[in-house]
Image (spheres, rainbow, N blue to C red):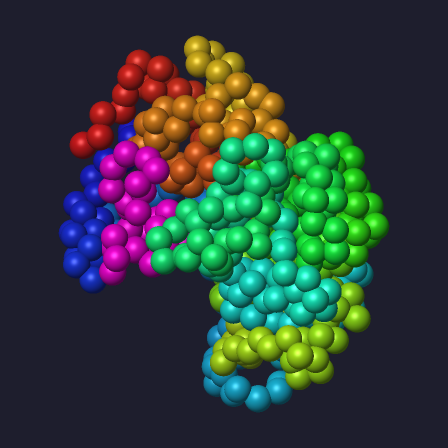
């Protein structure tokens, strides 16, 4: 029976809106991209979330990616409880941060050195500063539809045309701050080549999500990453893979392992902290030597590498590097993809499912979706109603079409089967014009 009783969530929502901007600490959680009010979650248990009214959901958001082992994993719980007994943060060197850093370097051979920070935004912001400091160049190239956190010069959108200077998408970002940011279409190596050739010796880096998870899920086209690797090597611009989402997700060694392309720098976040705030950026020894205190590029952080978060990250990676984990994630991802396709096969409207390992997306539009324009053409209103229909059937999907679903090692065939039933019913309800928001 669909669960709709959410009176306690409603009370909490009213209170939250009186205390935080829009009632949230991150905009997407406000459910503005879908109909209705957000659900307040009280606890996570393996593949499930339980809301403030006691309703249980199969969770495919996984806190936007970090919870690849599911909620409240015993190994992470034990590691954090143990670390807590020694304190939370010392603001000094400690072996715990070195332990996590070493595990990252072992997993990412393209990285000779890595710096721990506290979020994906910090990781990409710092990596770009290091690229600019190392190359002495100011411009950066980013792909439309890729999200790299909220640093000013990254909150830009493309103008018209294939390769354009960015214009701010957020208030508070002076146009001047966007003038060094060049936007190219994702999966278009020729546009990247044009951007580099139009600014010879001027581009510090090309940054992208190697499999894009912030416009829905858009995998790299055959040869795209290889082409960017060649173009940047020839130009002297650094290739930065933002693997905040794909790192430890699509393979233990991230997209660079899955697709066999090594960047000059890598940004990590989400999974690397095991659910606590950790980001990381790293790369070639010569580039990272530019970072303070060894070089002139300044970057710092009070809680960077703190022992508590480092303990959670070490515990998560220790679990993930066990044999068979990514084969299991691949199997579960493929089963969910097949279940969604079966459920959609009776739908009238166009739909398309994309998957890379245990990251997926159901687009309400024509496929394949290969770039941002393709994603924008999707029916977001229909996705909104679908999200609500699934919520009412106990399945928690990301509250926006331009996000990815995540499967964890805690999901089983039982959850996939229950999800397929919910998908089928939700598609029927949506095709009939519902659900109507309470
Ligand atoms: P954070 O600063 O949110 O830790 O990371 C920023 C970031 C950087 N790079 C990529 C590829 C990312 O996906 C993100 C953050 N992802 C979003 C969800 N698509 C986080 C959710 C949110 O903003 O609340």
Nearest the eye: 229 or 112: 229
Q: Image check: 209 left or right of 389?
A: right
- 189 part of magenta stretch: no
Q: Residue at x 49, y 66 (%)?
A: 277
At 25% from the left and 60% from the top, the residue drawn is 20
**Quadrant of res 43:** bottom left
Res 354 seen here: no
Q: From where the camera sits, is residue 37 visible? A: yes
Question: Where does the magenta region start and end?
Answer: 20-49
User: Percent from the top left, x then y, of residue 140?
Assistant: 63, 54
Magenta span contains residue 48? yes
Spot occupied by residue 303 in the image (x, y as percentages of width and height): 50, 78
In the image, 275 versus 91, the foreground residue is: 91
The answer to whether 146 appears left or right of 61 in the picture is: right
Residue at 36%, 58% (x, y): give it.
Answer: 172
The image position of residue 289, as x and y in percent, is 74, 75
Q: Quadrant of residue 143?
A: top right
């Amino acid at each position: 029976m669909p669960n709709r009783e959410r009176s306690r969530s409603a009370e909490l929502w009213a209170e939250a809106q009186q205390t935080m901007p829009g009632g949230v600490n991150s905009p997407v959680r406000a459910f503005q991209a879908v109909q209705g009010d957000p659900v307040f979650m009280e606890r996570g248990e393996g593949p499930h979330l339980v809301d403030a009214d006691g309703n249980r959901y199969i969770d495919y958001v996984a806190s936007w990616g970090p919870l690849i082992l599911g909620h409240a994993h015993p190994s992470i719980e034990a590691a954090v409880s143990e670390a807590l007994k020694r304190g939370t943060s010392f603001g000094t060197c400690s072996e715990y941060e070195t332990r996590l850093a070493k595990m990252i370097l072992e997993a990412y051979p393209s990285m000779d050195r890595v710096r721990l920070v506290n979020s994906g935004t910090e990781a990409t912001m710092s990596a770009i500063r290091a690229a600019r400091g190392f190359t002495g160049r100011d411009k950066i190239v980013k792909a439309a539809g890729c999200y790299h956190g909220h640093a000013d010069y990254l909150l830009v959108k493309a103008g018209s045309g294939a390769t354009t200077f960015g214009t701010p998408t957020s208030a508070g970002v002076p146009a001047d701050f966007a003038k060094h940011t060049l936007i190219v279409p994702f999966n278009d190596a020729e546009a990247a080549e044009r951007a580099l050739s139009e600014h010879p010796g001027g581009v510090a880096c090309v940054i992208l999500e190697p499999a894009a998870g912030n416009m829905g899920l858009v995998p790299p086209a055959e040869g795209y990453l290889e082409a960017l690797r060649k173009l940047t090597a020839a130009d002297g611009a650094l290739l930065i893979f933002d693997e905040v989402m794909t790192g430890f997700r699509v393979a233990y060694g991230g997209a660079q392992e899955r697709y066999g392309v090594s960047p000059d720098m890598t940004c990590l976040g989400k999974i690397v902290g095991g659910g606590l705030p950790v980001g990381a950026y790293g790369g070639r020894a010569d580039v990272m030597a530019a970072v303070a205190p060894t070089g002139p590029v300044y970057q710092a952080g009070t809680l960077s590498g703190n022992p508590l978060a480092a303990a959670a990250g070490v515990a998560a990676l220790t679990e993930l590097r066990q044999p068979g984990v990514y084969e299991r994630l691949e199997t579960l991802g493929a089963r969910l993809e097949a279940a969604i396709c079966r459920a959609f096969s009776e739908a009238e409207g166009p739909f398309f499912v994309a998957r890379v390992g245990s990251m997926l997306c159901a687009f309400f539009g024509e496929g394949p979706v290969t770039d941002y324009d393709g994603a924008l053409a999707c029916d977001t209103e229909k996705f909104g109603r679908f999200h609500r229909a699934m919520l009412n059937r106990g399945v928690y999907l990301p509250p926006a079409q331009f996000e990815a679903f995540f499967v964890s090692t805690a999901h089983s065939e039982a959850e996939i089967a229950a999800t397929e039933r919910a998908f089928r019913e939700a598609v029927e309800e949506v095709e009939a014009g519902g659900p109507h928001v309470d």
